[in-house]
Image (tube, rainbow, N blue to C red):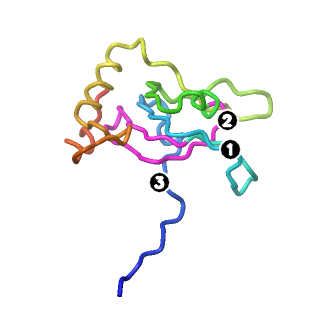
Amino acid sequence: MTTFSAPATGGGDKLAVADINQHYVVIFVKSYEENITTAHGPANAVRVNVADLTTGTHHLDVLWFPKVIVGSLRGQVGSMVLAKIAQGDPQPGKSAPWILEDATQEAAVVAAANKWLEANPGVLDEKAVAAPVASGLAGGLI
């Protein structure tokens, strides 16, 4: 007789945007998902894999809900996005929105992103044919 395990609840890794504020990241956008049931009612999200270049770590199958970030990434499904996590200007009566600042023109960040991707082939886009060379780079790259 086979012993079965119950499926995990909650899906992938947890990565709060607030925890990586001011970090440079490579984001692989897996999907855009509408009307996900949350404690605050239905919300739209993006499902992403994230390499944190500041710490050298990565997070897989993360759901992000911040509206501005979702808007920035919803049309990027299947793409790698290079950005810095930041907060925009607050609007009256509201907290500052989480945003992605373009990092594609910063040579050191582009070099760090390429170095991470070369050291971890197929991890973000899930096309790895073998185990990644490294799970992260100690101390980060930038």
Closer mark to the observer between disc 3 and disc 2: 3
The amino acid at mark 1 is Glu
Marked residue nearer the N-terminal end (2 or 1):
1
Residue in view at x 41 percent, y 45 percent: 59
Q: What kind of element bears circle 3?
A: loop
Give how far across and how far down residue 132 sits, in percent.
23, 44
Q: Residue furthest bottom?
A: 1
Q: Is residue 127 magenta?
A: no
Q: Residue furthest front?
A: 1
| Residue 73 on image: x %, y % | 57, 30
Cα gap from disc 3 to disc 1, whole angstroms: 17 Å
Q: Residue lying farthest left? A: 133
Question: Please, what secondary structure does the residue beneath circle 2 have?
Answer: helix
Location of residue 76 in the rendering, given as x and y in whole percent from the top left corner: 54, 28
The residue that label 1 is drawn on is: 34
Crowding near pointer 3: few (<14 within 10 Å), some, many (20+)? Answer: some
Q: CA distance from mark 3 to mark 2?
A: 20 Å
Seen from the viewer's position, the closer of residues 108 and 125 is 125
Does the segment drawn in magenta span residue 52? yes
Q: Which residues are magenta?
A: 47-68
Q: Residue furthest right?
A: 93
